[in-house]
Structures are given as C-alpha cells and as structure tokens.
Amino acid sequence: MNAGAPVLETIALNKRFGSLEVARDVSIALPRGARHALIGPNGAGKTSLVNLITGQLQPDSGSVRLAGNDITRKPRAARVKAGLARTFQINALFPDLTPIEALTLAVCERKGTAGQFWRGLADHGDSIDEAYAILRQLQLGDVATRSTRFLAYGQQRLLEIGLALATRPRVLLLDEPAAGIPKGESAELFSVIEALPEDICVLFIEHDMSLVFRFASRIIVLVAGGVLVEAEPEVIRTDQRVRDVYLGQAHG
Ligand SMILES: Nc1ncnc2c1ncn2[C@@H]1O[C@H](COP(=O)(O)OP(=O)(O)OP(=O)(O)O)[C@@H](O)[C@H]1O
C-alpha cells in the first residue's frame, strides 16, 4: 500500500430496506491520520453506513476496502483482525470490572490468551503494560483500579474507546462517542480522540456541530442515504445546500 492510499474506502455502496434507500452510491475514503465526521439529519443512514463498513450489514452492491484489501464479504471478526474497530451508541461495559481488568482482558483476547486470563496475573505482564499504556493515552490512568460502575459517564465512554484500541485498529469508527455526556465533558473526550496516534484513522458520527467543526479534519454530509458533499469544515460551514438540508434544520 502506498503512503497516500486510503486506509479505508467504500466504493459505490448501495443498501435498501424495502423501498428505503439507506446507502446510495456511497464512496468515501479515509487517509492516514483522518479525523472525519459523518453528519446528516436523523435517519440519513449514518449508522447504517458504519454497519456496512463493519459487516453488521451486507451491501446490495459496492465494496469496502481496508488497507487496499477487499473486505466486503469478510465476517465481522476477520475485519476486526484486519484493523477495523468500532464503538456503539449504547454503553456495553461490564460494571464490576475495573478499567485495567477490562482492558487487560481485551488485550489478551486479541492475543488469543484470554482463556488463561484467570490463571494468574504474573503470566500477563506484557498485556497489563499494554492495557496501562492505553489507559494513560485516554487519561484514565488515575481510575485504572476503580470499578467501572463508579466512573463518570465520560470516562466510561473513553473506556469503550480503549477496548476498541486494544484490538490495535487502523480505523476506529465511533458512533456518537459523546452521546449522553454532559456538554462540558464532551470536548475533553474529543480532545483525547484528536490526540490518538496518526496511524489510527477515525470516522465519527456526531450531532453537536460545535464539536464537529472543532475536531473534524473533514466532514461527510449524508442525506437520504447519499453523500451530499464531503469537504473541509470551512467549506461545509458556508455550503448553502448543507445549510438548507441540515444546519438550517438543526439550528432553526
Ligand atoms: N435493519 C433495518 N431494517 C429496516 N430499516 C432500518 C434498519 N436499520 C435502519 N433502518 C432505517 O434506515 C434509516 C437510516 O437509519 P440510520 O440509523 O442509519 O440513520 P442515522 O443517520 O444513523 O440516524 P440517527 O441520526 O437518528 O442515528 C432509518 O429510517 C431507519 O429507521
């Protein structure tokens, strides 16, 4: 794969649910270091597009390529192994585990050693180190040994991102990572996402336009299953079509 080639690419993806078109010739590309936002009105097909990329949904036509390889027909687990990770809108954490336990388990899972996890921590030194490194990257080092149920909601969302990072992704797909977080904390969460290493591309769905304009390097606007426009934030901000169909609606 050459340096400028997209890490993740969708080519003319189409998907219908009966008469409803949720993806209409969707072609997007994420280069190395991408921090792309996927925006659009409710029901535009944003989550469906993420599901098509991860394999939760199969397209009617079109393809998905990861690091130059066609993964369209690959099962979900194989896509994760190939470097595709996602988080969901809903919190799916184990409340009784501590962040360091949950992350060490996730690292062991990736390495195929999770079956021996409970034998003894001494056997998992490298995995624990790796888990701590992820926690520090997410500024969760201070709460590493606190039960997940006692973490602030924003910290729980970060831990979910941590679990995705434990798979060593090339691409991270975040479906409304700040959903449910108090407004003041969501910028913090996005700062952490922004600061992830360049070799992890990020595509995030977000409804809060102030966060989108602050943190996205590019914005993809989806309307009725199709890409209306994809451009840098400055261009999107002044695009009349976007104002008409989306921003106008959002801000009255
Ligand atoms: N499995 C399904 N079967 C039938 N219709 C579906 C299915 N999944 C999604 N839809 C419909 O497809 C449309 C697109 O949904 P999707 O969740 O992708 O939109 P979205 O842009 O993510 O919306 P939101 O911003 O509200 O989360 C919606 O009208 C939804 O009801």
Image: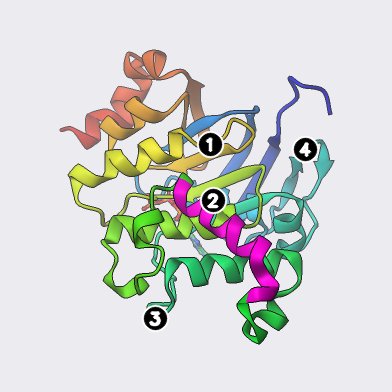
Q: Is residue 147 above or below residue 196?
A: below
Q: Quadrant of residue 233?
A: top left
Q: Is residue 244 above or below residue 87?
A: above
Residue 96: numbered disc: 3
Residue 166 at least partly seen? yes
The magenta segment: 122-136
Q: Position of residue 222 (x, y in %)?
A: 47, 36
Seen at 40% across and 59% down, the residue is: 89
- The amino acid type of the residue labelled 4 equals Ala
Real-space CA distance between mark 3 and mark 4, rounded to the nearest whole angstrom: 37 Å
Asked if the residue under mark 1 is in contact with the one under mark 3, i.e. CB atoms within 8 Å, the reply is no
Q: Quadrant of residue 93?
A: bottom left
Q: Secondary structure at mark 3?
A: loop
Residue 40 at least partly seen? no
Seen at 74% across and 74% down, the residue is: 113
Give the quadrant of the C terminus.
Answer: top left
Binning the other alpha carbons within 10 Å of mark 3 as few (below 14), some (14 to 19) or many (20 upward) gives few
Q: Which residue was labeled with disc 4? A: 67
Question: Which marked residue is nearer to the observer: mark 3 or mark 4?
Answer: 3
Residue 226: numbered disc: 1
User: In the rendered structure, which disc, 1 or 4, sits on the residue that comes first in sequence?
Assistant: 4
* In the foreground, 91 or 20: 91
Residue 133: numbered disc: 2
- The amino acid type of the residue labelled 1 equals Gly
User: In the rendered structure, which disc, 2 or 1, sits on the residue that comes first in sequence?
Assistant: 2
* In the foreground, 97 or 17: 97
Asked if the residue under mark 4 is in contact with the one under mark 1, i.e. CB atoms within 8 Å, the reply is no
Q: Secondary structure at mark 2?
A: helix
Q: Is residue 113 above or below residue 194?
A: below
- As for residue 114 lying within the magenta part, the answer is no
